[in-house]
Image: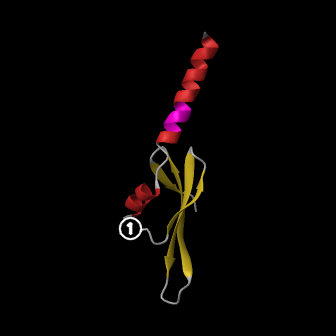
Amino acid sequence: MKRYRMQIINAGVLLAFIITNPSVSAFKAHQGASSYDGLKRKYNFFLCSIYTHTETWADGSEHDKGTYLGILGNFFEID
């Protein structure tokens, strides 16, 4: 019985991580951006995601504005 209970708890925690993995639209709102230009989900691990924000300058070159970890509905800058 104890083993079954632990499996249910682990499944619940795993499900919470999956459900609260933030979307690109949530990342857009977090950045305060008006469009999706330069916002990208680089990796999706289903439990968490890695997002990048780049900016295109007038000369056409792209410059990194940051890399973020999205987990449990929040974003944390990792770069």
Going by the numbered disc 1, the residue's amino acid type is Ala
For label 1, the residue is 33
Label 1: element kind: loop
Quarter-wise, where is residue 28 in the image? bottom left
The vertical placement of 23 against 11, above or below, is below
* Percent position of residue 49, x then y: 56, 52
Most common secondary structure along the magenta stretch: helix
Residue at 60%, 22% in the rendered image: 7
The residue range painted magenta reads: 13-17
Point out the residue furthest to the bottom here. 59
Closest to the observer, 68 or 60: 60
Quarter-wise, where is residue 26 in the image? bottom left
* Percent position of residue 12, x then y: 52, 28
Give the colour scheme of this rendering. secondary structure
Residue at 61%, 12% in the rendered image: 2
Left or right of 19 on screen, residue 29: left
Left or right of 32 on screen, residue 62: right
As for residue 10 lying within the magenta part, the answer is: no
* Percent position of residue 8, x then y: 56, 22
Left or right of 20 on screen, residue 48: right
Q: Could you tell me which quadrant the N terminus lies in?
A: top right
